[in-house]
Image (tube, helix red, strand yellow):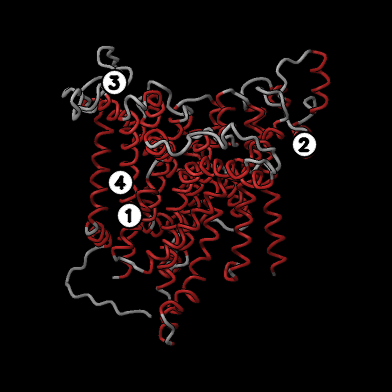
Amino acid sequence: MKKFRLYYEEYNKGPFRLLWKHFTQQHFAFFGFIALLLLLLLAVLTPFLTPHDPYLQNSQLLLVPPSWQNSGLVSYPLGTDDLGRDLMSRLMAGTSYTFGLAILAVLGSLIVGVILGALSGMSKGVKSSVFNHLLDLALTIPSLLLAIVIVAVLGPGLLNTIWAIMLALLPQFVHGVRNAIQQQLKQDYVTAYRLDGASQRQLLLFVIFPNLWEQLVLMFTMALSTAVLDIAALGFLSIGAQSPTAEWGSMISDSLDSIYLAPWTVALPGLMIFITVLAVNLVGDGIRVAIKKRREN
Amino acid sequence: MIFHYLMRRMFLLSFVFVALTIFAFSLGYLFPGDVLSNFTGLRNISPADEIVLRQQLGLDQGYWQQYIYFNQRILDGNWALSFSSQQNVLDEILNVMPATLELASYALLLSLLIGVPFGIIAAVRKDKWLDKLISGFALVGYSIPTFWWALLLIMVFSLTLGWLPTSGRLSVLYEIPRLSGFMLPDILGSDAPYRNEALFDAIRHLLLPSLVLATYPTTVMIRFTRESMLDVLEQNYIKTARAKGLTRLQVLYKHGLRNALLPVTRQVGLQFSTLITLAMITEVIFSWPGIGRWLIDSIYQRNFPAIQGGVLVVSSLVIAVNMFTEILHTLLNPLARK
């Protein structure tokens, strides 16, 4: 069933350009990509952008509704919470906790995962098999349970639960990298390099890794949505981020008491989490579709 | 062949359980506080008792000896006492476990009943508006944070409309004797005069939590079934079947479904660990008296023996389910047997 591949143009686009072309053709995915860039910018620049101090309590302005309601104030566009803190500033500050820390956690976990996955993918025999089974064990422990154990040992706090999230993400990275490397090792061009006298290290660095990065980006987006949801869920359960912190999940649990009076204090942080995760998933799906389309054409 | 495979799985299972018990045992040392308290669950131990207990637990001997004693206690059902209630942790877990299993199994059933057919429809109508609609809904459900979704549903259906209760498994008006711990079978098995009313009430209590818990697995099932079906529909044997003159439905049922649903059986096992995590969050929001709420209460109370026991039981459950679906998948799919 192999079709002939015809090249009509003199210059053919590289694989990355092709991927980008297929990606931007999907409007929703591209929209998610822009939303992610904006969120990233917000997470980095948030100390300079917030209109008010996110932790400043103002007893004169408790539970001010958003400015589109009659009793709202223009200087507090999204209203205030039950301690008179500006909700918009808190939501902006929360970007760097829920989204920024999720990125750092996934990056850290990904780096360790690539190293362990490369070690496991390039080795064979009993050592690799024992390692895999240990990973399978780690894979089965639910992430919330792992977080509970780590919090019990180290005490509650945002940073401690980050360790739990990194640990919970690690097995899927190691598995993914290992499978990808073993698939690469079966390719003909890898054999050709080997016949050329390339060592294991050269094979890994110059032949396999350049073919791996798309897979890594895909794994990154999938893990990022899990990480954002986990950080928010742990904050909501007051196991992760503790009360004054402007983390989206803990903001929801703080405002639960005033859910009758001020539903926006619960709805808006949740909406931010939802938008962030949706954007990440749109980008992930977009990349997957783009890779598939490039393979077909 | 199959026997050989099962033997290998059993060997692997025992290896995993040894690793798990070593992990649970080491938690006794890792948790803050006194090691003796962590292993027994006793709070104020008199010096005379301490010597006896140390000997019983083997704390005066090496770690391996202690680990063997630990396993013996686990197997005898002689688990540590909970710090908060001073009852055997195993009894407490067996008390709350059925509620979680009931909730999780209804949610899993719901996700299969809804997710698989919709995934197939989406795959068959690929890139048509129906597929876009289903995939869009699946993506939204896949991205929504469970606890927020639960709060939204409570705001609409309980606070505004007042249709459904927000917490618990059954109204306090009804008293149902506990037989299995599973609410619906217990009600059906009881001979109370208000049996039908109680059943209706229990279903009303069950509706929101199982809907919330089912959302994520359903969307995963839709997405996964769709992908798997699309993969199968591209295969050559589908083209062969079409070329033989089979109708679309025949091809779909005889050649498509059977191959596409094989990976789905495996996905159920892989999703189970996420399901437990989500069940824990759902239980906290709906005050559902299951193991999730019990574990989260334990972490608030620094109840270390309870956490140790909970980790052991929940992980064993997840491992067992994983192993079971893996074996089922292998039995159904000859290609998976190496």
Which residue in the structure is indicated by mark 4? A279
Tag 2 residue? B77
Disc 4 to disc 3: CB gap under 8 Å:
no
C-alpha span from label 2 to label 4? 49 Å
Residue type at mark 3: give it. Leu
Q: Is residue B69 above or below residue B322?
A: above
Distance between the alpha carbons at the discs numbered 4 and 3:
30 Å
- Choose mark 3 or mark 2, whichever is in front: 3
> Which residue is disc 3 drawn over?
A63
Query: Are dots 1 and 4 on a single chain?
Result: no
Q: Nearer the viewer, mark 4 or mark 3?
A: 3
| Image quarter in which the C terminus of chain B is found | bottom right
Residue A89 location in percent, x, y?
A: 26, 25
Dot 4 lies on which element? helix
Do marks 2 and 1 share a subunit? yes
User: Badge 3 local density, few (<14 within 10 Å), some, or many (20+)?
Assistant: many
Q: For mark 1, name the chain.
A: B
> For residue A269, which quarter of the picture?
top left
- Which of discs 1 and 3 lies nearer the camera? The answer is 3
In the rendered image, residues at marks 3 and 2 fall on the same chain: no
Q: Return the chain for callout 4.
A: A
The answer to whether marks 4 and 3 sit on the same chain is yes
Disc 2, SS: loop
Q: Amino acid at mark 1?
A: Gly
Q: Position of residue B172 (x, y in %)?
A: 59, 31
How far is disc 3 from disc 2 in space, using C-alphas?
53 Å
B18 relative to A24 in the view: left or right: right
| Residue annotated with mark 1 | B136
Local packing at callout 1 (Cα closer than 10 Å; few below 14, some 14-19, many 20+) is: few
Q: Quadrant of the N terminus of chain B?
A: bottom right
Q: CA distance from mark 2 to mark 1?
A: 49 Å
Element type at mark 3: loop
